[in-house]
Amino acid sequence: MLRLLVAVVCILSVIAYDCTWTDPESGWFYDFNPLRYQNYAGTDADGRTYVARFCGYVDALDDCKKVLGGVCVTDKEGLHVVGKLTADPQPEWRLMDRRAGGGGARIHFDNGDLCHNYTVPRVDLNVECNPMRKDTYFAKVVEYLPCAYSLTLIHSAGCGTEPPHLRHSNMTRQ
């Protein structure tokens, strides 16, 4: 009976997990549930392969899975975990454009394994808004500084929902 109860609790905790975020400053709401059960991959100009997961850990690479890696990169030297879900500082959601919601959101990581230059990697895992697209791979993958990465998925989930106070003001202006 106890095993059954534990199994039910585990199943319910997975089902009940919600992958949403509301920007505390602007009120824009993002529902990333359509993204949460898939690994996303892409390759940069130097041939490195990146695998990441929104709202979860990469489950396709054993070494990444062991440390609950949210973003991993493979290069000629092997696999590197450049963003972790449970390490400090915790990953944080941000708007892609701080001046305006609706253009997309990102998870910012500052907590991966040390890079070859002894710096902590920085990763922006972006979801860029396009209401007509639901990509399954990264459209843009860039190492913009040594050990600083930007990975961009183009998906309708990045468009978010305008907060009620802005929807109301937009209707009254028309």
Image (cartoon, rainbow, N blue to C red):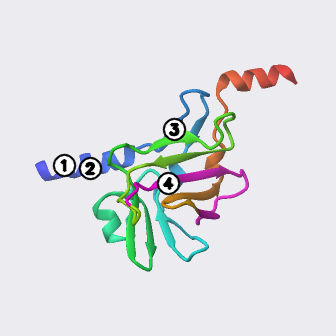
Circle 1 residue: 6
Asked if residue 169 lies left or right of residue 96, the reply is: right
In the structure shown, which secondary structural element does the residue marked by tag 2 occupy? helix
**Kind of element beneath mark 1:** helix
Q: Are marks 4 and 2 in contact (CB under 8 Å)?
A: no
- Residue of label 2: 10
Of mark 3 and mark 2, the one earlier in the sequence is: 2
For label 4, the residue is: 123
Real-space Cα distance between discs 4 and 2?
Answer: 31 Å
Residue 58 seen by the camera: no
Amino acid at circle 4: Val
Q: Which mark is residue 148?
A: none
According to the picture, the residue beneath numbered tag 3 turns out to be: 21
Q: Position of residue 44 (x, y in %)?
A: 58, 70
Q: Quadrant of residue 78?
A: bottom left
Q: Are marks 2 and 1 in contact (CB under 8 Å)?
A: yes
Instruction: Determine the secondary structure under disc 4.
Output: strand
**Is residue 131 shown in magenta?**
yes
Give percent across and percent down for residue 158.
63, 47
Q: Amino acid at mark 1?
A: Val
Where is 50 relative to 54, above or below? Answer: below
